[in-house]
Image (cartoon, rainbow, N blue to C red):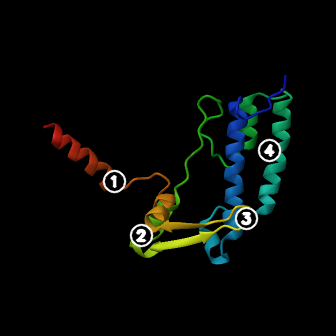
Amino acid sequence: MRHRTPKKNDALRIYKQLRDRMYARMTRYEDALPNQRQRLIPFGAVQYGEWSALASEARLKYANKEITAEEFLQRIDTMHDLTSYKVKECRLVQEPSKWQQYVTNNIAFDPERAFPETMMILDLRKGDSQWEYFTSEQFQKKAQEGHLSLQKEYSDTSSSQEEQT
């Protein structure tokens, strides 16, 4: 029986995550201005095409059970993004979020100046397009991708500890 769906197979799920990460690297590099590319991993369309061909060949061999899951992951992990090649232990190394990049690149980063107060967007790609209203807080949450500031995190726990005493 062949390995087919990422839902039922952890190695194929990891392959899909790695493919998405490689595609994101390629688009970041291709979309960056030439003077900003030196801070990025040099991974353009040519490199993505080469990786994609290699990964597709490895996936086909894995699907036909010619290679093991560990061999499959080892072949597709050319940038050393995986923490292990054992499927149960394997995790992708986390890249910094947009928020972390903003703060790292600019020590004087001020979210009130970086994000607009409000914005309305009309996405014409959808068949049923409607205006969407976004606030500065929504832009900040999207950039933070779930990262809470330490002040908020510790102020909530310290106030709850004070209430218990």
Precedes in sequence: disc 2 or disc 1: 2
The disc placed on residue 150 is: 1
Cβ–Cβ under 8 Å for marks 2 and 1: no
Q: In the image as oriented, which residue stretches furthest toward the left?
A: 165
Disc 1 marks a residue whose amino acid type is Leu
Instruction: Tell me the residue that label 2 is attached to.
Output: 111
Precedes in sequence: disc 2 or disc 3: 2
The disc placed on residue 125 is: 3
Whether residue 87 is visible: yes
Horizontal side of 16 relative to 83 (left or right) equals: right
- Which of label 4 and label 3 is nearer to you? 3
- Report the Cα–Cα distance between label 4 and label 2: 39 Å
Give the class, few, some or many, for how many residues have Cα within 10 Å of label 3's Cα (few <14, many ≥20).
few
Give the class, few, some or many, for how many residues have Cα within 10 Å of label 4's Cα (few <14, many ≥20).
many
What residue sits 66% from the left and 64% below the top?
28
The secondary structure type at the circle numbered 2 is: helix
Instruction: Tell me the residue that label 4 is attached to.
Output: 55
Cβ–Cβ under 8 Å for marks 4 and 2: no
Precedes in sequence: disc 4 or disc 3: 4
Q: In the image as oriented, which residue stretches furthest toward the top?
A: 1
Above or below residue 57? Residue 118 is: below
Disc 4 marks a residue whose amino acid type is Ala
Above or below residue 123? Residue 6 is: above
Disc 2 marks a residue whose amino acid type is Pro
- Report the Cα–Cα distance between label 4 and label 1: 39 Å
The disc placed on residue 93 is: none
Above or below residue 77? Residue 149 is: below
Precedes in sequence: disc 3 or disc 1: 3
Residue 81 at x, y = what percent?
Answer: 63, 46
- Report the Cα–Cα distance between label 3 and label 1: 38 Å
Disc 3 marks a residue whose amino acid type is Arg
